Image (cartoon, rainbow, N blue to C red):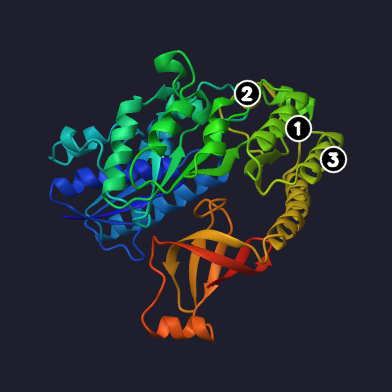
Amino acid sequence: MKIDLITLGCSKNLVDSEKLMRQLEANGYEVEHDPSQATGDIAIINTCGFIGDAKKESIDMILDFAERRKSGRLKQLIVMGCLSQRYRKELEEELPEVDRFYGKFDYMEMLKDLGKVYRSDLALERELTTPKHYAYVKIAEGCNRTCSYCAIPLITGPYRSREMEEVVQEAKRLTESGVKELQLIAQDLTYYGQDLYHTPKLAELVSRLSDLSGVEWIRLHYAYPTHFPMDVLKEMRERENVCKYLDIALQHISDNMLTKMRRNITKRQTLDLLDRIREEVPGIHLRTTLMVGHPGETESDFEELEDFVRQQRFERMGAFCYSHEEETWSAKHYEDDIPLEEKQRRLDRLMKIQEGISAEINEQKVGRMMRVVIDREEEDFYVGRTQYDSPEVDPEVLIQKGERGEREERRDRGAKMEIGGFYEVRITGAEPYDLYGSWE
């Protein structure tokens, strides 16, 4: 009756796993998430199928557990999630060691096949795998965008907003259990509410969540630049518990590439949007994602992207190489005409620019007092984040233990930082992707 549940891919997958864990535990199973050593009778792998590297990671994980299944150390191997949603038939043919495959949305069927029942009264409950003070809140499924390179709509289907009242009720349950930081996620936050209410509702949702007792921070992930809901900027600017942080994937800046990528936005519109965001929310930290090596990207296009990064000085930036994905617009209409070595060269150049920008931005924070939430305790440091930092992907603040003088004496008298606590920390040092601090 013990299950090892392994989650691969994004935080949206993690939420699915957390909901499944609650159902399994309610049906009498003991569930361990991402165990360092697999010991369960059953293994469930929640896969990712977004791009080539993610698919490879999922396949490798399945093969590892398939060996356990063949050797008799595992009684049952189950695969679910995005990869099996997209390639279920092929996987069933090629991986007979797997007992059952399920898609992304049919874990009710999984419970039935295990001889258990889905508990509808627990639909809003989860077994958190994150530290208990923060949680991801998924406000929608699917995507209506038609970006040339993206397979997500093929996997998840069209956009489906969750009812606002349901999201608020889930968030209320989370805060009542001790969650202080809500990470709002969806494939596209920008579109939230358009399908249900025929008008964008992200700002109203943020406002209602902000009013909940116990919410210290709300953070917005995965916005889309086209038809961005400007009214959400007012919530960011005026509400203290809405982080001045926005994760908005831009992908490129040259009009040639934005057209080929089917982004439905121009360079001028992108620049105007960024100017307005920074004007309306002073001090905001922007995280973006950029792509290199999309079919048709010329050296001139790439140089334009480099100049864009230098000029915008994004506080947070990630980038990745284009991956030719079956059945996408790109795969049907373009040749993957840029060699992998050239894609990697461009990626390295872009990230080198960003490393210097990140170092300069972090250095400017030295000497400032900043509010920090503590995520974990290590041997020599407490490790936390500011409102400008999302878990896992953004810089952390490392706060040295055992400082001398009055601060050390205070700690000797029993004062210590608590996981999930918020503290005023003085920034004492900086690296490109980390800060150092002192609790005074």
Amino acid at circle 2: Thr
Q: Quadrant of residue 413?
A: bottom left
| Residue at the right extreme of this rendering | 300
In the displayed structure image, the side of residue 111 where residue 428 appears, left or right: right
- CA gap between label 2 and label 3 equals 23 Å
Amino acid at circle 1: Ile
In the displayed structure image, the side of residue 159 where residue 41 appears, left or right: left
Q: Nearer the viewer, residue 227 or 208?
A: 208
In the displayed structure image, the side of residue 234 where residue 262 appears, left or right: right
Vertical side of 366 occupied by 321: above or below? above
Q: Nearer the viewer, mark 3 or mark 1?
A: 1
The residue at the point 48 percent across, 28 percent down is 203
Q: Residue 303 — which label?
A: 3
Specify whether residue 99 is in view: no
- CA gap between label 3 and label 1 equals 10 Å
In the displayed structure image, the side of residue 214 where residue 53 appears, left or right: right
Give the residue pinned by disc 2. Answer: 226
- Residue 332 placement (x, y as % from top left): 63, 22
Of callouts 2 and 3, the N-terminal one: 2
Where disc 2 sits, the SS reads loop
Vertical side of 386 occupied by 56: above or below? above
- Residue 15 placement (x, y as % from top left): 36, 43
Amino acid at circle 3: Glu
Callout 1 crowding tier (Cα within 10 Å): few <14, some 14–19, many ≥20: many
Q: Residue 253 — which label?
A: 1
Where disc 1 sits, the SS reads loop
